[in-house]
Image (cartoon, coloured by chain):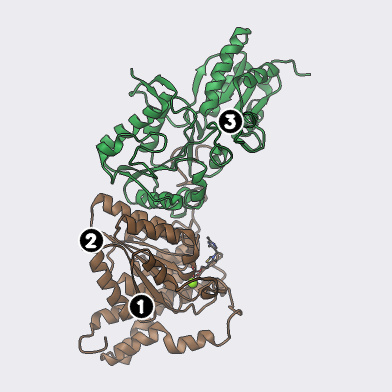
Amino acid sequence: MPKLTYRDASLAAIQHSMREDQTVWCVGEDLGRGGVFGQYKGLREEFGESRISDAPISEAAIMGAAFGAAMIGTRPIVEMRFSDFALCATDELVNQIAKARFMFGGQSRAPMVIRKPMGLWRSSAAQHSQSLESWYVHIPGLVVVCPGTPQDNYSMLKAAIACDDPVVYLEHKGIWDLEGDVDFSKEYEFGKAEIRREGSDVTIVSWSNTANLAVEAAEALSEQGIDAEVIDLRSLWPWDKEAVLKSVAKTGRLVVTHESVAVGGFGAEVVATVAEQAGHALKGPVRRLGAPRSLVSYAPNLEDMLRVTSEMIVTAAQETLKKAS
Amino acid sequence: MTSAGHNFERGRSLLEMMERIRAFEEQACLAAERDKLVLGAIHPSIGQEAVAAGIMHNLSKEDILLSTHRGHGHTLAKGASSLAMMRELLGREGGCCGGKGGSMHIADFDVGMLGANGVVGANITIAAGAAHAIKLLGDNRIVVDIFGDGAINRGPFLEGINWAVVFKLPILFVCEDNQYSATTRTASMTAGEGAAARAASLGMRATTVDGNDVEAIADTVADIAARLRAGGPPEFLHAKTYRRTGHTSFDPATYRPANESTEEEKKNDPIKRQRAVLVAAGMSEANLQSLHENAQKEMIDVLKKAAETPFPASETAFQDVQDIGSPAVEAY
Ligand SMILES: Cc1ncc(C[n+]2csc(CCOP(=O)(O)OP(=O)(O)O)c2C)c(N)n1
Ligand SMILES: [Mg+2]
């Protein structure tokens, strides 16, 4: 089994998909030179400039044109460079891509992957650091995924490319160099969470890079004799409600944590669902951990004020184990 | 083109299509105002029919069309069924979009009509992408995208036209200039020399045509389509016409001089003008009258049938959202 970085795992997924399906193509700014994070490196040499296509700095046109191309028989992979710039193509994604199939009564499909690297990336400040995954979950018509490991960035990207729905594919740009084993034969099923660590005392639900921090936190907790179960949702729409409810039924304790702003975040959806459907199973207070509702700074110490750390997850887990007063 | 060289058959068929579009929209307006059967907004293209008829005459069903909120005429001329369209306007079963889109999202993929759009200008980039895919797939179809004069002030106009030029795509962009953007005179809010000049500034061949002269539009687009099919670069057409009704069927358009529309009808109605062309080419009044009456009869009948059609089954409200995580499976 090869050891690959998160970046190279995505590269392999695209390469394998493009070899299998001639209608798959990639479009975005600077792809010919390998993309800004090197996540397209070498693909131009193999597939040529029409299938690894550069684009003008026209996010609306990249998104809109890829959509037009998706409606008539191709499977575009759209590169938005930074998820922040994808906001320039919000109409195209939210009003057009997500709605066309429905509005046209099922006459069309938009089989496309919209790659939007998100998240904190040291000293990138407020316009290059956002995590807006919860926005997209709110839009019917979109599939929303947040891979957090090299294996997932292979299997999930392959599945996204093969999917007939538009998939908002949110990679975390802080972990391009993260290494891990990647089994090319492993298939991803949309809406299936991964239990990253089994445990019986407290359930920690997360996704994207924060799931990696949750695994670290669980290891620290185990040294204190607390056995945490870590659920990496991986996909936010659809999301694996069953896995979460089952785990909470076992542990009776819940922490939900993500890098994005806590207020109105997807963590709230998870907590609300548990309250509605498994409230009786809860044995302690629920903890929801995300960024304060503030903006990301340039200065590293200020940036860190918005960062969820594994230490914070440890503390939150401990709090859920306190007796309800 | 009223000389001996006039293509009589084509001229007749252009008039016939304009009569059908006019009759369809007259009935649609009645369905809205008289019958209260069209519940949402409709944007009539009465007085602008020459653009739809003249362009679509040169396209096959395989060619791709994208249109605007004012797209009934384009859709009908591309070959959609008038009954399926009327059902869509009434939100009924069997409408082109199953009653889920209505007038503003009318589409018929079977005839290459990839949709009107409720967002001004949004189809410009999408149409460029359709042409992009045609080029990638290596087939011989062409794309036409029609938008209003107001759309040239939106960003997608720049982004989409630049895209088409850069990638040398087989597409014709048409600015159907009816001089109004909702209640505003477009000229009062538009800098520079207008649509064609803007396209030309991006290196695109831009042609201006009398948008009420259906023969001229058909001729011009025949030439452009031939160039595109031969692998030529994208082109632009500015067709100047006039919006005779209000912005929607309910808008009395009190913001413009009371006689402006009637004066325009007297001088420039594209149907009257084409009738005159055909009379000069030898068509009898009786034949003209029967073209008119057939169109009227078709659309009266279509409205009657559409009104008798049931609303869509309620479960379709949850269908065709998405395959993965569809609401039929997941309420929330
Ligand atoms: C992005 C956007 N802004 C505003 C509107 C509201 N609106 C609908 S049609 C219209 C006028 C459009 O004018 P034009 O492009 O000339 O088309 P016309 O209605 O004249 O056919 C406006 C402002 C909209 N639908 N989309
Ligand atoms: Mg207008």
Looking at the rendered structure, the secondary structure element under dot 3 is: strand
Crowd rating for badge 3 (residues with CA inside 10 Å; few <14, some 14–19, many 20+): many
Distance Cα–Cα, label 2 vs label 3: 50 Å
| Residue A304 placement (x, y as % from top left) | 62, 28
Residue topped by disc 3: A259
Horizontal side of B302 relative to A246 (left or right) equals left
| Residue A310 placement (x, y as % from top left) | 60, 20
Distance Cα–Cα, label 1 vs label 2: 23 Å
Q: Quadrant location of the N terminus of chain B?
A: bottom left
Disc 2 and disc 3 on one polypeptide chain: no
- Res B289 seen here: no
N-terminal of the pair, mark 1 or mark 2, is 1
Subunit ID for the residue under disc 2: B
Q: Quadrant of residue A268?
A: top right
Distance Cα–Cα, label 1 vs label 3: 56 Å
Crowd rating for badge 2 (residues with CA inside 10 Å; few <14, some 14–19, many 20+): some
Q: Amino acid type of disc 1? A: Val
| Residue A82 placement (x, y as % from top left) | 48, 40
Chain A's colour?
green
Looking at the rendered structure, the secondary structure element under dot 1 is: strand
Looking at the rendered structure, the secondary structure element under dot 2 is: loop
Residue topped by disc 1: B209
Residue topped by disc 2: B231
Q: Amino acid type of disc 2? A: Gly
Q: Quadrant of residue B111?
A: bottom left
Q: Amino acid type of disc 3? A: Glu
Colour brown, chain: B
